[in-house]
């Protein structure tokens, strides 16, 4: 019989391996076949939870290169590259992305690759496909498809389940349909529709345990507190711009400043003037910080190329005076950010 570590029960040895940082797991897998099997087992993920050694990573997908995701490890200030998402859709974009149950989920969306002859989005504006990446076995797998194909929709996690709402099925048809997914049962179920749709993309935010569906340019916010009771409509005079949630508080970047939104009041936190020239970036709450990632800068002259950014700027909010710093730039991804989410492993 082969033991993970001679003289130590495997259950204890597994808890020892669970304390090793995730970025070293490929090295652990080279030690022996039994260590390789342990590193790629769901038991290791459970053990990491038990010994409280889970780590938080930032997952990023950008327009360039196609269908590629990277993980940022803040403890090591390093980027890890995942296997390419094996979707048949070229340049998958306008999808929903969340993490739950230790996995990264990519939902719906359509192609951002335009046929130069017809101008069509590669024949696919919206899909209902769902992919899950398991960081333990390091593989993508198809999961149950959504009931309705959609792109540019709101997507959040509530109590471990994924809720999707709104969006578009074609470039001209917005929808009010909403549904919820149980990752353990791999099943989608329809829930109450949104009260209204709007001819613009929507996004989802979780604030105080409630899902908020926000449409660009609208003050109306639709809120889901209880799945069985459905959505309620609220009027919020929130500042318009890229939004993220940090420690339960809403932050917005607008007109060269980052604001903290508190109910109907807002206050300036710090200047973000340097980002006014950048578009297509991600603004993401991560721990106590706000990360501003990637994007593009337009040409200053007509004969200049668009600059695809891989920079990562971090605003630390925990101190009395928030300060900016730079983290390691993305090593593979660059340009417009298509998806950004936190993943615990």
Image (tube, rainbow, N blue to C red):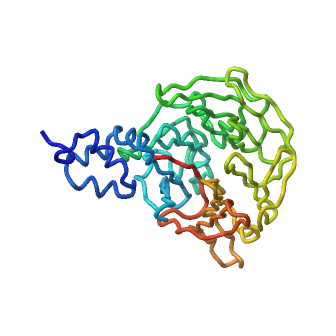
Q: Position of residue 54 (x, y in %)?
A: 45, 47
Q: Is residue 185 above or below residue 262?
A: above
Q: Is residue 312 above or below residue 184?
A: below
Q: Residue, x 62% and y 67% (percent of image)?
A: 313
Relative horizontal placement of residue 117, taking residue 177 as reference (left or right) = left
Q: Position of residue 84 (x, y in %)?
A: 42, 52
Q: Position of residue 171 (x, y in %)?
A: 69, 42
| Residue 199 vs residue 232, the one in the foreground | 232
Relative horizontal placement of residue 156, taking residue 243 as reference (left or right) = left
| Residue 201 vs residue 58, the one in the foreground | 58
Place residue 177 in its image quadrant. top right
Q: Position of residue 317 (x, y in %)?
A: 69, 60
| Residue 339 vs residue 12, the one in the foreground | 12
Q: Is residue 124 above or below residue 282?
A: above
Relative horizontal placement of residue 295, taking residue 40 as reference (left or right) = right
Count every numbered label the image shows and give the total.
Answer: 0
Q: Residue, x 77% and y 68% (percent of image)?
A: 271
């Amino acid at each position: 019989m082969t033991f993970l570590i001679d003289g130590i029960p495997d259950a204890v040895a597994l808890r020892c391996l669970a304390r090793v940082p995730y970025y070293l797991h490929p090295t652990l897998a080279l030690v022996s076949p039994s260590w390789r099997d342990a590193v790629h087992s769901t038991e290791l993920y459970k053990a990491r939870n038990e010994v409280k050694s889970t780590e938080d990573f930032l997952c990023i997908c950008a327009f360039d290169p196609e269908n590629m995701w990277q993980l940022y490890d803040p403890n090591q200030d390093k980027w890890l590259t995942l296997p390419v998402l094996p979707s048949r859709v070229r340049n998958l974009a306008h999808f929903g992305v969340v993490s739950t149950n230790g996995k990264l989920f990519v939902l719906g969306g359509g192609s951002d690759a335009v046929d130069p002859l017809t101008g069509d989005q590669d024949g696919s504006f919206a899909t209902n496909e769902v992919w899950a990446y398991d960081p333990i076995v390091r593989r993508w797998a198809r999961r149950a498809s959504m009931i309705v194909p959609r792109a540019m929709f709101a997507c959040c996690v509530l109590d471990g389940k994924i809720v999707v709402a709104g969006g578009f099925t074609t470039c001209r048809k917005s929808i009010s349909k909403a549904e919820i997914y149980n990752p353990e049962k791999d099943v989608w179920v329809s829930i109450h529709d949104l009260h209204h749709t709007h001819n613009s993309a929507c996004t989802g935010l979780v604030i105080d345990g409630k899902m908020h569906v926000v449409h660009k340019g609208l003050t109306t916010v639709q809120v889901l507190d209880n799945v069985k009771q459905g959505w309620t409509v609220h009027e919020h005079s929130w500042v318009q711009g890229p939004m993220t949630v940090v420690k339960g508080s809403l932050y917005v970047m607008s007109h060269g400043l980052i604001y903290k939104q508190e109910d109907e009041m807002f206050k300036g936190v710090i200047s973000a003037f340097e980002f006014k020239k950048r578009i297509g970036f991600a603004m993401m709450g991560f721990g106590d910080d706000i990360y501003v990632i990637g994007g593009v800068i337009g040409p200053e002259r007509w004969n200049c190329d668009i600059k695809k950014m891989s920079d990562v700027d971090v605003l630390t909010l925990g101190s009395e005076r928030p300060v900016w710093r730079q983290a390691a730039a993305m090593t593979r991804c660059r340009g417009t950010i298509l998806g950004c989410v936190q993943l615990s492993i």
